[in-house]
Image (cartoon, helix red, strand yellow):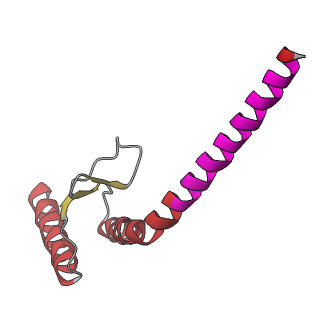
Amino acid sequence: MATDSNVQVSKVQTQMQDALNRLDINLIVLWKPDVSKSTHGEVNSNIILIYCEEAEEAWRTFTQEVTEYKLQSVTRPYRILVNSLIEAVRNLFMQKKSSLLIFFLND
C-alpha cells in the first residue's frame, strides 16, 4: 500500500516538475505529504514544498504557490513604491514634529 502511495507521489511530483519546466520557472517541486505542517505548501529558496496528502489538494496547492511566485515579480515594483512613499511621509512627519518641538522648547 505504501509503495502505491509512493508511486503516486512520484508520478504527480514529476508532472508538477514538468509543468514548471514548460512554464520556464526555475524551481524544483517536492511533494512531501505531512499533515503535521500548518501550511499546505510553501516556496523555500528555489523549492516548492507541497505537504498535502491527497493528489487533488496537492495540485491546488501547487497551482496557488506557482501563481503567488509568478505574481511576486509583478507586484514587487508596487510594493517598493508604496514602501518608499510611506518612508517619505514618515520623514516629512518627523521633520515637522522636530520643528514644532524646537519651536516650543525655544519659547
- Which residue is at the front of the view, 36 or 20? 20
The N terminus: image quadrant:
bottom left
Question: How far across and how far down the image is residue 75, in percent?
Answer: 47, 67
In the displayed orientation, state which residue is furthest to the bottom: 22
- Which residue is at the front of the view, 55 or 66? 66
- Which residue is at the front of the view, 66 or 83? 83
Q: Residue at x 68, y 48 (%)?
A: 89
Task: Tell me the magenta residue range.
Answer: 81-105
Q: Residue at x 40, y 68 (%)?
A: 64
- Number of marks in the image? 0
Which SS does the magenta portion mostly show? helix
Task: Tell me the quarter of the picture where residue 72 sits.
Answer: bottom left
In the rendered image of this protein, does residue 39 appear above or below residue 53? above
Asked if residue 98 lies in the magenta stretch, the reply is: yes
In the displayed orientation, state which residue is furthest to the right: 107
Question: How far across and how far down the image is residue 6, in percent?
Answer: 12, 60
Question: How far across and how far down the image is residue 59, in percent?
Answer: 33, 71
In the rendered image of this protein, does residue 17 appear above or below residue 37? below
Question: How far across and how far down the image is residue 31, in percent?
Answer: 22, 59
- Is residue 72 left or right of 24 when viewed as pictured? right
Task: Tell me the quarter of the picture where residue 16 sits.
Answer: bottom left
The C terminus: image quadrant:
top right
Q: Residue at x 38, y 54 (%)?
A: 40
In the displayed orientation, state which residue is furthest to the front: 106
Q: Residue at x 84, y 16 (%)?
A: 106
Asked if residue 87 lies in the magenta stretch, the reply is: yes
